[in-house]
Amino acid sequence: MEPWMKISLHLCVFGFLKEIRPSEPFIYDYLIGPWRNLTEDEVTKQVYPVGTYANMILLVLVFLITDICRYKPLIVVLGLSGIAVWAMLIWTTSLFSLQVLEVIYGMFCASEVAYYTYIYAKVDKEHYQKVTSHTRGAILAGRAISGISSQVLVSTKWMDFKELNYITFAAVSLATLWALFLPSVDRSLYFHSDAQNRKFSAKVGSAFTLMRSHFMDAFTNSHVVKWSAWWALSTCGYVQIETYMQPLYSAVQHSNETAYNGAVEAILTLSGFLVALLAGYLKFNWEVKGELTLGVFSLVQGVLMVVISQTDYIFLCYAFYIVFGILYHFMVTIASAQIAKVIDEDSYGLIFGLNTFFALVCNSILTVLVATEGVGFALDARGQYVVYGGYHLAIALVFVIMGLRTCFGSRGVGESCDNIVDKAPDA
């Protein structure tokens, strides 16, 4: 087996194991259930926001030290953080311990940047696409199996919500053990880009010079700026909606109805995988119609969120959430490709790391406004989703206007978008 294939296999096994988290589709029901005896307001307004803020702050730290530490140590930290999170979920009960847990969960999420950038330092550029597709497939497989297993175990009453945490704890423990056997990285993209034994201060200066060069090359390109802006804003909305979807389910669902949270997550994961594949084969002139398409997709997403904020039918809520997620996964794949094709391959980790940080900043601002008690409006679940719908409608308005300007402004008001597309080369 070729060395790059072995590395790909190692990464796939780790990614698969860390995504086996069947407790997550029902985590809200577990937290407000008899095992921890917390109120809905305590969970949504005093616990969840802590994780959002911790993720944003810790991402900065992780982003700065990942390259210095050469990736593998942070991947191990990712695993250890997961072990700590699910150990505390199982064996602690207080509100304060749950808030501490959320800080650690922020590290768990932030450390994933090391996993996603490891391949760029360990694998030759010619294998980037293959290894990326392998690891992405392993992650989606883990999530799908996690959703299916959680739904089966809950529906058959073989396990309750607390017992699902034991499976998650075992899976992240195995993932951490496996991470110890990942090959070490001798070089990295910035701080260890060559084999010379230079002083650390020289390495730092060289690294930041290269980072600045990559940053300027990317963000002085208007194409990168507009696609990155949508990527970050839309990712912010998706993360926020994913985080607070279970509280909305609880508000919509009648007490005698069976919960299908796990099945919904499995369907969304598999559908997201399929539309991501479709996006790779779609022939479309994104340079001309891209902004308008982003605006239309955001418009549909906004309408979906407003509707589910008012519905009393849980299956409509499930269906619209799945459609929302499918639209996101499709367009975020397109956006990622549009960004990647015009930036230096060595800057992928930096640019997408910065985009992720911007998304988390927006995520934190939204959380302060709609969910944090004593600071923002501390809205209930339905009120939050009205805001999330309005947020996506605002994104839609901006990108539709930009799209119309692109279609008509550069060629004259009298020429239609379709005519422009017909004359433009394929993207």
Image (spheres, rainbow, N blue to C red):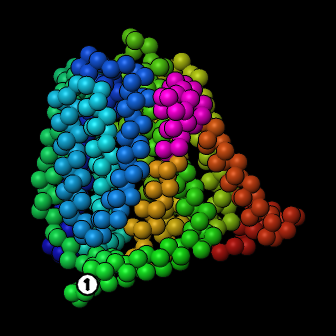
Q: Which residues are magenta?
A: 363-388
Which residue matches tag 1? Answer: 199
Of residues 234 and 111, the one drawn nearer to the viewer in this rendering:
111
Q: Label 1 amino acid?
A: Lys
Q: Is residue 397 magenta?
A: no
Tell me what residue is drawn at x 61 percent, y 62 percent.
226
Instruction: Give the prevailing secondary structure in the magenta stretch.
Output: helix
Residue 321 in the image: above or below residue 139: above
Q: Is residue 371 magenta?
A: yes
Residue at left 59%, top 23%? 310
Considering the numbered disc 1 on the image, is that residue within a helix, a strand or a loop? Answer: loop
Residue under the image location 57 percent in, 62 percent down: 227
Give the quadrant of residue 11. bottom left
Q: Where residue 303 appears, x then y in whole percent?
A: 63, 36
Give whichever of 97, 284 is nearer the camera: 97
Quarter of the image that includes the C terminus = bottom right
Please determine whether, in this image, residue 369 is positioned above or below residue 223. Answer: above
Quarter the N terminus occupies: bottom left
Q: Residue at x 42, y 37 (%)?
A: 49
**Residue 416 vertical placement versus 427 (above, below):** above
> Would you say residue 379 is visible in this rendering?
yes
